[in-house]
Amino acid sequence: MDKRVGVLGGGQLGAMLVEAANQLRIPVNVLDVGHSSAKQVSSIGTHVEGSFKDRDAIKQLAAISDVVTVEIEHVDTGILEEISGTVDVQPSWKTIRTIQDKYAQKEYLHEHGVATAKSVPLGTASVEDLEKASSILGLPLMLKSRREAYDGRGNYPVKTKEDFKHALEALGGNKSLYAEKWANFRMELAVMVVKTKDGVLSFPTTETVHENSICKLTYTPARSVSDAINRKAQDLARKAVACFQGKGVFGVEMFLLEDDTLLVNEIAPRPHNSGHYTIEACRVSQYEAHLSAILDLPLRQEDLELREPAVMLNILGGEAKDSHLQIAEAALEDRWLKVHLYGKGQARKGRKMGHITTKANPRNPTPQPNSPQSRQNPS
Amino acid sequence: MDKRVGVLGGGQLGAMLVEAANQLRIPVNVLDVGHSSAKQVSSIGTHVEGSFKDRDAIKQLAAISDVVTVEIEHVDTGILEEISGTVDVQPSWKTIRTIQDKYAQKEYLHEHGVATAKSVPLGTASVEDLEKASSILGLPLMLKSRREAYDGRGNYPVKTKEDFKHALEALGGNKSLYAEKWANFRMELAVMVVKTKDGVLSFPTTETVHENSICKLTYTPARSVSDAINRKAQDLARKAVACFQGKGVFGVEMFLLEDDTLLVNEIAPRPHNSGHYTIEACRVSQYEAHLSAILDLPLRQEDLELREPAVMLNILGGEAKDSHLQIAEAALEDRWLKVHLYGKGQARKGRKMGHITTKANPRNPTPQPNSPQSRQNPS
């Protein structure tokens, strides 16, 4: 418990990691610019000022940490490889390198027998190469950036050949694209997986609901999903994470297709939005689990089980400067709702400013929700 | 939620208050010396360096805060009275002034019809005046310091006349003493009470177990206590707090006598050790409740109800420098146990270094505990 943790990135995921570490006074050095969310909740004198992409800043972080981890995968894995000679990097830089390139990630999963949507890399960001990909995958397809994509940025649905040019333009002349076979999913599921020194554990299966490609809600357990699918999702998620090196939590996002097939959509090598609910609903949160994994603290499968059904709602930046604060204040009217604000300063529209988790009231159980509407399109 | 809170004192109670505030990014300025526990979990740039007894430091805190509160009652209420002209002080300085003098507190409670152990002030700290008190109260009696007492310091059991001299010596020539009628309690109970702008709410009744006059364990609900006593304890605690001015949480410690009579032992005008369990076991913790009360955020009686039975164990400094860390590490083997460490640096023997809370495992209920052993002596 006296090992010093260094985190690349100081957003809300880093902040909640620090909050979990605070309980045990595990020292966490945060690398980020300015008074970022994670730095706000710790006055340790050794935070590092700078971008989590800055090579020198990362070296500085490594020099004062025993274990270096990430709250974001869009980092320079070259420098992580370099520092891994002198400091423990978790998960492995190799894992982060593979995962941060979404096409390489899919290929890697495919090689390891993990079901994913068929994907084809584009040699160049040209109509010609997109044409080739579409002849293999058919239409519609999803055109995606291989790197630096999050919250739906870097994804573009291509429905007909008429969309080719616009899709390439929309992805900003990005040279590094791939095309993915359209997944007719009826639901999106996610499982937080924990890779420890001893094995691969998993949190419950969660249903994620996206709006404008941003996670809006999660339901745990997933609504109207059979035990069999639940187990299949757990198995697939654990299998997917098992093939990567290193320790820590991983967010595994999956598509549940109309025929009940499950495909891995993508993996995050870090705590994930779909695991926020664990703070209130599980014995050990995804953040405590991540710390436990990278610091070799005891952790068992039973520690990750769901204690109470939970719904998580993201608080996004809205039309007004203080829309998110208005939501938070309204939520405080019902103290079953646990409000988390991230202290991220200016609220851009769609920016994740906080979240709300509610657990089922055991004295006043809510009626069983209806089956979710079938959603034909990734949105 | 944008009001700035100033806290006199930066120990573990202040730290857990800050942790609760962090969730909503409520800005909390801490006044204490050095890198105290509460300052560790917040990098707000406006903490104040100095003793929470320092007049100038308190004025400095007031100048940058909208509401000033305390995590300890041993403060200079003169200066609180002075600043209350320009800043909201919660609870009222009058309340803190009455409560910090334990004899004045008892007298005040008695005047307001709240049952307490009969108490007699000593004119001087002399055998003669103790003799007078004992002729009123009988023997045994408890000799107590009126001020600055905590964790049993400042209490001395006087069993026979032969103890008089030693008792007075043991309390260090303290000029300000009082004698209290011996309470033959069979159990100690505590209730955290919340005084809001609208009313007086209460958390569940907790059983506290002391060892060497320091709180060792709490059980919530109290073991083998009837519903009637439970309700009586709640009513007494609410009645006791209702007679004080101001808002915030109050810890009410009570004796349950052999004949089921309840007496208020003492009141703390702040979060209290006997309410730590609320972090894990109630919808709203005592710390969130305190913030809610002093900031007029919504709070209802149902928010304070017990969700799951809980046991809290204090981690005290022990024989070895790292005894408390050994306990914490051992506790991590069972992740049902939630470990809190306070980052208080050097562990003196008996110093509160952390605590552990466990909730009942709903899938594996523990057998009903036996009736607690009858305890004849306050220990």
Image: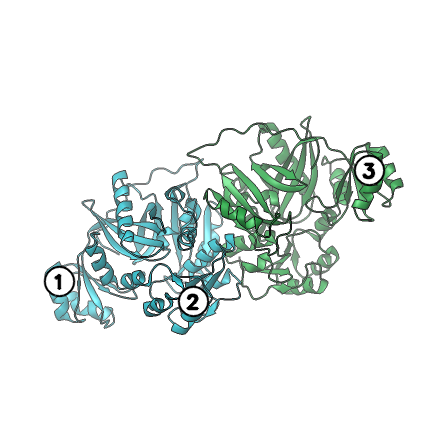
Chain colours: A green, B cyan
- Which element is circle 1 on? helix
**What residue sits right under mark 3 in the picture?**
A163
Q: Within the image, what quadrant is residue B125 found in? A: bottom left
- Residue A198 rendering spot, x and y as whole percentages: 60, 45
A295 or B123, which is in the foreground? B123
**Closer to the observer: label 3 or label 1?**
3
Say if residue A287 shows up in the picture: no
**What residue sits right under mark 1 in the picture?**
B134
Q: CA distance from mark 3 to mark 2?
A: 62 Å
User: In the figure, is residue A247 to the left or right of B107?
Assistant: right
Amino acid, disc 2 = Ala
User: In the figure, is residue B271 to the left or right of B104?
Assistant: right
**What residue sits right under mark 2 in the picture?**
B62
Q: CA distance from mark 1 to mark 2?
A: 45 Å
Chain bearing tag 3 is A
Say if residue A369 shows up in the picture: yes
